[in-house]
């Protein structure tokens, strides 16, 4: 990112997602991040998927005996179960 071109590329957007989700982006980067979201539907979808994944993972850890949402991707279920087996 340069002063002449404050817009983020999709690659830069992905690099800043973690800081965005933690609320630790500097104000200038946060503004560029939000501007990118306003113009890039694929990055909006990617960010939404990350938020949903995080929320589902939190639910799985909080209430392990609750039923899973019917639209939960099977690949995600397998990945979470595999991760649990590795950490046991």
Image (spheres, grey):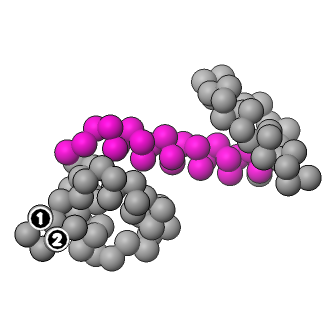
Q: Which residue occupies 74% across, 41% down?
A: 80
Q: Which residue occupies 74% across, 33% down?
A: 78
Please provide percent x and percent y for residue 77. Answer: 72, 33
**Magenta span dominant secondary structure:** helix
Q: Residues within 10 Å of mark 2 (few under 14, many from 20)?
A: few
* Secondary structure under the numbered disc 1 in the rendered image: loop
Q: Residue furthest left?
A: 4
Dividing the picture into quadrants, the one containing residue 7 is bottom left
Please provide percent x and percent y for residue 55. Answer: 60, 47
Q: Which residue occupies 77% across, 51% down?
A: 62
> Is residue 8 at all visible to an observer of this figure?
yes
Q: Residues within 10 Å of mark 1 (few under 14, many from 20)?
A: few
Question: Does 54 appear above or below 49?
Answer: below
Tag 1 residue: 5
Question: Does 10 appear above or below 6?
Answer: above
Tag 2 residue: 2
Q: Which residue occupies 78% across, 46% down?
A: 83
Range of residues picked out in magenta? 39-61
**Pointers 1 and 2 in contact (CB under 8 A)?**
yes
């Amino acid at each position: 990112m340069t002063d002449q071109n404050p817009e983020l590329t999709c690659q830069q957007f992905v690099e800043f997602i973690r800081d965005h989700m933690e609320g630790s982006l500097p104000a200038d980067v946060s503004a560029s991040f939000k501007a990118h979201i306003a113009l890039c539907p694929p990055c909006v979808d990617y960010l939404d998927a990350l938020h949903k994944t995080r929320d589902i993972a939190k639910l799985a850890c909080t209430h392990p005996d609750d039923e899973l949402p019917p639209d939960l991707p099977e690949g995600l279920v397998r990945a979470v179960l595999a991760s649990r087996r590795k950490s046991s």
